[in-house]
Structure formats: C-alpha cells, structure tokens
Amino acid sequence: MKKIFLGLLVAVATLTSCEFSETIYINEDGSGKMSMYLDASELMPMMKSQIPAEMKSLDSLISFKEVFAGQQKYINQLPKRDQELIQGLAKLNFHVVLDSDKDKLNTDMYMNFSSINDVQNAFDGLSSIGKLAQNRMTQGSISSLSDVNSDDILTAEYSLKKNKFRRFIRIVDTKLMDSLRTNLGQMQMILASSTYKLNYKFPKKVKSVSLEDAVIGKDGKSVTVTVNALDFVNDPEILNVEVELEK
C-alpha cells in the first residue's frame, strides 16, 4: 500500500501541489490551540483509481491520550523524562479525511494547550518517538525514549515570554541536513509547487514581526507568513520568527 501511494505521489508531482499550514491561537491566559494541517486534495483526481474500495471514504480520529490509556502502569516505570514526553504527546489528536467522490484528502494534527510550553513538549515527544522508531529498525530495541538523540538534524523552540512570541528552528547537523536535501528526489517537484504557511493569532496587538514578508491582520492581532514549501525544507530557518506584542 505504501509503495502504491509513493508511486502515485511521484507520478503526479508536476501536476499537483499541497498546502501545509501551522496554526497557533493564543488566549489571554496563555492557553490556546495548535494545528498542523495538510491539504493534499489536488492529488485525489490522479489517485482515486488506485485507492482500495475499503478506503474510498475515510474519516478517522486518533487520540494519543486514548492510545496511552490503560498503559499508565507501564508508563510509570519509565524514566521521568520519558513520562514527561508521553504526557506531552497525550494532548495530541490526529485527524485524517479521505473522500474519493469529493476529491478530498487532508490531515490535521492538533492539540489544546494550557501554555505554549505544551506545544514545545509535544514536538519534543514526536521527535523522540520518530527517532526511536528509526533506531529500532536499524539497531534493535531501545528501552528508553530519553536514550534517543532526537536533535540530530534540527531543534525547534516555541516560547512566549514578556510579550514576545518566538518560533525558532536551528540546524544542528549540517551534513545530515545536506543529505536530506540531496535525497529529496522527485519529491522536490511536489514541494516546489506547494506552500508552507504560518497562521498565528495573539490576545494582544502585534507591535513588530521579525520577518519582512509577514502580514499583520486587520485586527492587528494576527500574523501570517507564506513561503514555498521546497524553500522551507531546504532551509527550515527561513521561518524563524519573533513577534513582539503591545503591553
């Protein structure tokens, strides 16, 4: 199944585009909602004939909290850092919608948070889980998430302190990053015609934004930035941003 979808993605790469968006809404008390959304509906006209009948229509919601439900006994036996990572992941939900008749395909990973630190913790947990899976495939079993170096390529920071919101990605290993860029293959064509967009909404008016191409909304409290998806993959630091809010 994975091979079929990969082949289709490559086959329609020059004809289609995707829209990636990263949305964060922050309330007055620091709580809010985060969403990582992908709209790949433009792929559907070329994909629908290859989709199995049982997958023609799909609307599935996965709650990470439910995944971990009933596992608390085992989670409590893990190192403290691992428990913190899992706690961060427990707030995440993953929603996928596929409808062949309506040419619809999108995914949304989202969470409600009590502070922006929850977003940071969730990304730390996802990074560790991903690297853990990779290590298990290549090196065998690893018993602890905290044994996994998840920062081998990138680190990400989300923070809100003293009326300043910060989203900062740093390339840690330039050699591995170069390898990623050179091995994109024909995925480059999909990414080159796609966009990556930041949508941020704050409880106070925006005083300044560090990115020149950022657009401040009419209400003065929202910021949007759109870049080419391939440019973002080649240089994730282009969307590093600091937003200063009015006091």
Image (cartoon, rainbow, N blue to C red):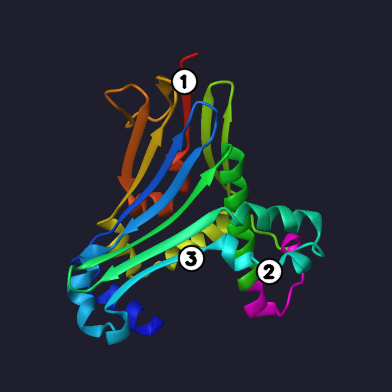
Say which quadrant the N terminus sits in: bottom left
Quadrant of the image occupied by residue 51: bottom left
Secondary structure found at label 3: strand
**Secondary structure mostly seen in the magenta stretch:** helix
Q: CA distance from mark 2 to mark 1?
A: 42 Å
Horizontally, residue 88 falls left or right of residue 52, namely right
Q: Which residue is depicted at the point 34% across and 37% down?
A: 225
Horizontally, residue 111 falls left or right of residue 59, namely right
Q: Which residue is depicted at the point 66% across and 73% down?
A: 135
Amino acid at pointer 3:
Ile
Q: Which residue is depicted at the point 44% across and 40% down?
A: 24
At which x and y percent is residue 156? 57, 46
Q: Viewer-proximal residue, 61 or 245?
A: 61
Q: Which residues are magenta?
A: 134-147
At which x and y percent is residue 226? 31, 42
Whichever of callouts 3 and 2 sits on the residue coming sooner in the sequence is 3
At which x and y percent is residue 179? 50, 64
Residue 52 visible at all: no
Which marked residue is nearer to the observer: mark 1 or mark 3?
Answer: 3
The residue indicated by pointer 3 is: 62
At which x and y percent is residue 17? 24, 60
Q: Viewer-proximal residue, 191 or 97?
A: 97
